[in-house]
Image: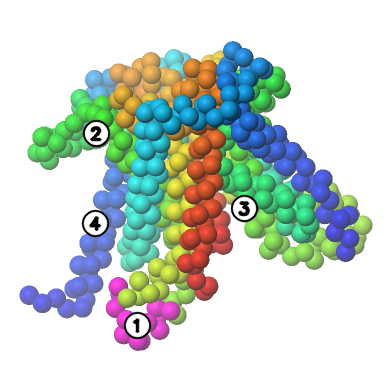
Amino acid sequence: MKLGMKEKKIVFSTVLTVITIAACLIILIPLMIVVLGSFKNSAEAQAFALSLPTEWHFDNYSHVLVKGKIGQAFRNSMIITASVTAIVVIAGSLSAFVTSRKETRYTKFVYYLFLIGMVAPIQIVTTYALLQLLNLSGTFVGVILVETALQMPWTIFTMSGFIKNVPRELDEASFIDGATPVRTFFSVIFPLLKPIVATVIVTTAMGAWNEFMVPLYFFNSSSKWTMPLTVYNFFGQYSSDWNYVFADLVLTALPITILYLLCQKYVVAGATAGAVKG
Amino acid sequence: MNKKKFYPNYFTFPAVILFIIFYCIPIIAGFFMSFTDWHIKRLLTPKFVGFKNFIRLFGDEHFILALKNTVLFALSTTIGIVILGLLLALLLNSAVKGKAFFRTVFYLPAVLSLIVIGIMFKAVFKMDGGILNNILTVLGLQSLTNDWLGNPKTAMFCIIFVQIWKWSGFAMAIYLAGLQGISADYYEAATIDGATALQKFRNITLPLLMPAFTVVITMNTIGGFKVFEQVYVMTNGGPGFSTQVLSTYIYSEFSKGSLGRSSAMSLLLFLMISTIAVILNTALRKREVEM
């Protein structure tokens, strides 16, 4: 049988759709097993089946909230995420504003400084010693400052790329009106940065929420543990109770997933910010 | 316009000072500490020992294995992500229906914590009743079931798979941005000239996607060398040392208190990543064409 042009097209697009759905399932099946398993009893969850629970155990969540110390971990993660994001956005946009508006030896130095940060891995051992020396070891302040430094380079490059397209005439008009640089930045420029600030906020918040290595090295007291550290530790203790482990995983991933679904546009913009014009 | 007055350098100070203190100083200090016998019990009195740490490392078979594993991981995950990401992007750039939904799903793993993903994949690769073994059994491939993470021959591949699973959607987003930037005129002109779909792909799509390739390759290679969480969660370097990578080995030396040796390894990792980033960037940028 010979296929006509139209039939060929239909076959082709069906094949593509089937492949796309298959790829989709590879991502969704494990996630669905986790979500469904979080409502099952222990024996049922351990079967890792893609089936609805015979009986919905919402109590898995209350169990995990108490035993997994999720309340405290949630609070710790919020403190760190909010602080890192706030500092990164303000310090990053201030710096990007100046370095993208003029070119001097100093701004070139700043450019190369942050370029190193885009590539180089964190030297965590000496950072640990530094925090000890500064008496910041095991404190929120120490972890917040280290994570802020870690997130700064990307923020500055992303922001600079955006600010370069904000017309310079706007700041010049404001200066002619007699406004100070601080006033000009906060009342004229910063409001125009909304889209890129949104991108930086969601990207930084996700990075800080998911960060594992820094709190792992720097918090030895479990009272300061963040969500990923707590879930890791919980898994170590309850590795046979998959229903609880799954509930804990859902609780850890939920805030980020919601943020992603609500702000998808900004999340993807963050990913591609460096891609279109490297 | 007086730039000095209106764009004051002090605007940059909070970011620059924070970054220098908490990022650059540790890098510089790490360089010096690599040449000492620094130990957690003698935090303030390290002694200079020359190249001893480095000589010991290169005589340490576990370090060599961690080095090999790291290179294998970075290389194979980058290849996997570069190809799969491109396939996903091409699928979503074609006539498939429900693009927005698929894009949301494909990108989802990129935002999830590696700890969450790592624990989830422990359930996938578990020996007894694990998801993968269940699927194989259902398909009648019982002979292929395996203790995936407990077997030194397969554990590394599982960790590689997890990285590809997590980051292919991210690469897809970068390619999609690149694909959307290619003007339809090129394809129309090629169609008029009688070019086949494959020719169009090779002569239009691929060259104009080079900037996206540069970003995807560079980012994933660097990220691959830094791999830590999924190994730490899924195997902690085991069974034996079969999945040990540099970052987990650095952490285990750190936990033992050998800060000098840990710093020496960090320095080597730093040098490797910086060199590779520079080489990759110059090599790939050359191949980019102006639109």
Is residue A95 located in the magenta-colored stretch of the structure? no
Q: Nearer the viewer, residue B7 or A165?
A: B7
On-image quarter of the N terminus of chain B: bottom right
Q: Nearer the viewer, mark 2 or mark 1?
A: 2
Question: How packed is label 3: few (under 14 Cα within 10 Å), some, or many (20 or more)?
Answer: many
What type of secondary structure mainly makes up the magenta span?
helix
Q: Position of residue B242 (x, y in %)?
A: 31, 30
Q: Label 2 lies in what chain? A: B
Amino acid, disc 4 = Val
Q: Is residue A32 above or below residue A94?
A: above
Could you tell me how far apart the alpha carbons at marks 4 and 1 are, in whole angstroms?
Answer: 27 Å
**Dot 2 surroundings within 10 Å: few (below 14), some, or many (20 or more)?**
few
**The numbered mark 4 sits on a residue in which chain?**
A
The residue carrying mark 4 is A18
Q: Which residue is mark 1?
A: B191
In-front residue for pair B258/B203: B258
Residue at image point 75% right, 53% down: A107
Q: Is B266 on the left-hand or right-hand side of A132?
A: left
**A96 in relation to B290, above or below:** above
Viewer-proximal residue among B82 and A255 = B82
Amino acid residing under circle 3: Thr
Which numbered disc, 4 or 1, marks the residue closer to the eye?
A: 1
The residue that disc 2 covers is B153
Residue drawn 84% across the image and 51% down it? B8
User: Which residues, given as a range, are shown in magenta?
Assistant: B186-198
**Chain for disc number 1:** B
| Chain of the residue where label 3 is placed in the rendered structure | A
Pointers 2 and 1 in contact (C-beta within 8 Å): no
- Residue type at tag 1: Thr
* Element type where label 2 sits in the image: loop
Mark 3 sits on what residue? A158
